[in-house]
Amino acid sequence: MNERDILRVAVRAADEKKAENIVALNMKGISLVADYFMICHGNSEKQVQAIAREIKEKAEEQQIPVKRLEGFDEAKWVLVDLGDVVVHVFHKDDRAYYNLERLWGDAPIEDVASDFVQ
């Protein structure tokens, strides 16, 4: 499974739990950490946890190793490390505060809505 397939699994899982404003940043040539950063948010701690849990479960179903899952209990910023794709699931208020899209403003934004959401 390549990085685009992994991204597709993560986007669809987040969409199934009604994640909002799903964005994928193409980090190739910008970061050594991952090829893609996927960023989304939920409107409550419970929704943030549901999104992160769904991403983890769908990844495992597809035999995508989940290398790390951090921040789940606090549910303000959950990081799901899928290797070539790192998913950031924020609580709405925390997403605005950290503003990763601006921090990584030189990374091209991928159109995930038309390609990946069912």
Image: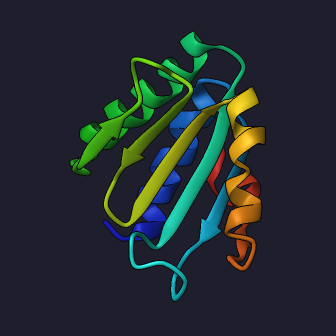
Whether residue 57 sits left or right of residue 92 in the image: it is left
Q: Residue at x 46, y 30 (%)?
A: 52
* The C terminus - image quarter: top right
Relative image position of residue 73 (x, y in whole percent): 39, 17
Relative image position of residue 93 (x, y in whole percent): 75, 28
Answer whether residue 111 is visible to the viewer in this image.
no
Q: Please say if 68 is above or below 105.
A: above
Relative image position of residue 82 (x, y in whole percent): 34, 53
Answer whether residue 33 is visible to the viewer in this image.
yes
Q: Total marks drawn?
A: 0
Q: Residue at x 39, y 70 (%)?
A: 33
View extreme (front): residue: 97
Nearer to us in this view, 53 or 72: 72
Q: Residue at x 50, y 19 (%)?
A: 50
Nearer to us in this view, 49 or 93: 93
Q: How is the image coloured?
A: rainbow
